[in-house]
Image: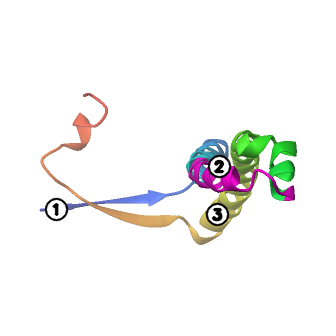
Amino acid sequence: MSTLKLKLKKIDALKYGIITGTLMAFIVFIMVAIAFLFTSLFGIGAAGSDAYALGAIFGGGIFMLILAPILYFVFGFIFGWISTLVFNFILKKTGGLDIEFEKTGLDLQQIGNE
């Protein structure tokens, strides 16, 4: 099989920032939701202690279930955007990144016509 060689010159920083922020928010939402379930189970046993009152002040974990994904999206977007700008600068100075693809049964003219 023949190979197709392309050169990566630039990545759209805004789109990459959105993708990075969204992935980070999704992952942290799943992690916080799982932690919320386990801490809710353990919190039932601590109903008479000071830990129960502290948990009630912060909404019993629902506060973090909402706030953590928002914060992770914002920071993921910012750091994804900055890292892409740096990466694009490096690509510009080094002449791009050579990427090699293996050509399969699909012709180059057929890409995007599906």
Secondary structure state at the residue bearing disc 3: helix
Which is more foreground, mark 2 or mark 1? 2
Q: Residue at x 15, y 52 (%)?
A: 104
Residue 30's place in the image compared with 90, above or below, is above
Q: Name the residue under label 1.
A: 2
- The answer to whether 75 appears left or right of 114 in the picture is right
Question: Mark 2 highlights which residue?
Answer: 40
Residue 49 on the magenta span: yes
Quarter of the rendering containing residue 38: bottom right
Measured from the top left, where is residue 103 in percent x and y?
Answer: 20, 55
Magenta-highlighted residues: 32-50
Amino acid found under the numbered disc labelled 3: Phe
Q: Mark 3 points at which residue?
A: 87
Point 71% across, 50% down: residue: 72
The three-letter code of the residue at mark 1 reads Ser
Question: Which badge, 3 or 1, is on the more N-terminal residue?
Answer: 1
Residue at image coords 82%, 57%? 51
